[in-house]
Amino acid sequence: MENFNTLYNTVIIFIAFVALYFSAAIDIKKRNFTKTGLVFAFATLVALLLLFGLRDKEIGTDTLMYYWQYKNYRHYEQGTDFLMGFVFTGLNQFSNDPTLYFFVMAFLYLATFGFAFFYYARSLGSNVYLVLFSFISLFFFEAMGINTIRQGVSLGFFALALSQYYKEPVTFFKKSVIIFAVLSVGFHLTGLIPVILFLLVISLRKIRLGYYYFLYFFTLVLSVFSVSILTFKDYIGFLLIDERRSGYLEVAKFSKLYSIGFKPQFVAFNTLFLLFFVYIRKFVYVSDGSTQLFKYYLLSSSLFFMVFQLPYSDRWGVMSWVVIPFLLVPLFKVGTGRRLATATVLLLTAIFLFFLSYQSK
């Protein structure tokens, strides 16, 4: 495990140095290096695929569980994650070695996010490598690659649905958007949550941004006083579909196993990027599409604050965090009038190093 962590952190630092080069080219030389960035982005994804997909079964707290599930797929009920049954059954026709499963899931995780960032970055003329770096540098990226891999793939398809939504013509009910949204839910039932939240945002697009700001800070205050979604647990129908996940509402069972309660580190993380996005909107770039994504970020963050009293609350937080790279896209191109690409890369690197130090304690 220690060797894997050392190799992984070394790779990320190298990726950061390359990102620093591209960002300096944007700020100083006024060059996007779009094609070169695409080549480096592809090489980065391949390197991470090999790292995640060929990892040893001791790497990751959930890997042994997935190892057992794959080997004993005939006796394991997938429940509401209906696509996982097809994945296990199909892959076992080729090999009963779980490495194949890890490799395929790593490929789906990296490919979905990679294509999503490529489509969205291209629409704004930004450097896709820097957008990819903004995702890789975030502290949850590794965890979704080796631990919560089903949720990682699910959110990857959700991100891909978002990227397809913002291709002309803009309609959620395009075939490609629907297909990717269904795949998101099929790999992990919780994929239904971001899909519903985004549907709410685009359906209620006339609601002013100020109301989302109010909701963000109102739910933040509620979470400080330990008011949570548990107050409304009898009305959370989508959780009651799945007996295993509805069991997370019985907090007493998990109180000694997981940290439950207000999470100041996550509040600081979400609020830091909130302020960053407010700055981008005011001084760099704003559009109807970016406003919708920002509203989704505020709404999903508000929901996140309301589940601090549940175990695995960070698995709700990632539903807001996955749109951070999309909202940072305007910074990674020439012509914004402000030299912010390099500063953003340095900030993201500093955040990565902070969480690396925090998690090692």
Image (cartoon, rainbow, N blue to C red):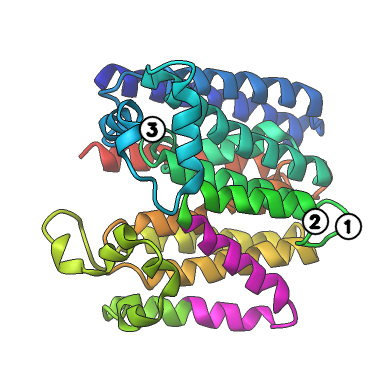
Dot 1 or dot 3, earlier in sequence: 3
- 161 in relation to 280, above or below: above
**Side of 212 relative to 174 (left or right):** left
Q: Are marks 1 and 2 in contact (CB under 8 Å)?
A: yes
Label 1 vs label 3: CA separation?
36 Å
Of 180 and 31, nearer the camera is 180
Residue under label 1: 169
* Corner quadrant of residue 314: bottom left
- Image location (x, y in percent) of residue 6: 33, 20
Q: Do the residues labelled 2 and 3 touch (CB within 8 Å)?
A: no
Label 2 vs label 3: CA separation?
32 Å
What segment is highlighted magenta in the picture? Answer: 190-216
Of 354 and 84, nearer the camera is 84
Three-letter amino acid code at disc 1?
Pro
Label 1 vs label 2: CA separation?
9 Å
Task: Using a 10 Å C-alpha cutoff, classify the residue at mark 2 as few (fewer than 14 neighbours), some (14 to 19) or many (20 or more).
Answer: some
Three-letter amino acid code at disc 3?
Ile
Of 143 and 63, nearer the camera is 63
Which circle marks residue 174 in the picture?
2
Dot 1 or dot 2, earlier in sequence: 1
Q: What element carries label 2?
A: loop
**Side of 21 relative to 89 (left or right):** right
Residue under label 3: 146
Of 17 and 93, nearer the camera is 93
Determine the residue located farthest toward the right in the rendered image.
Answer: 169
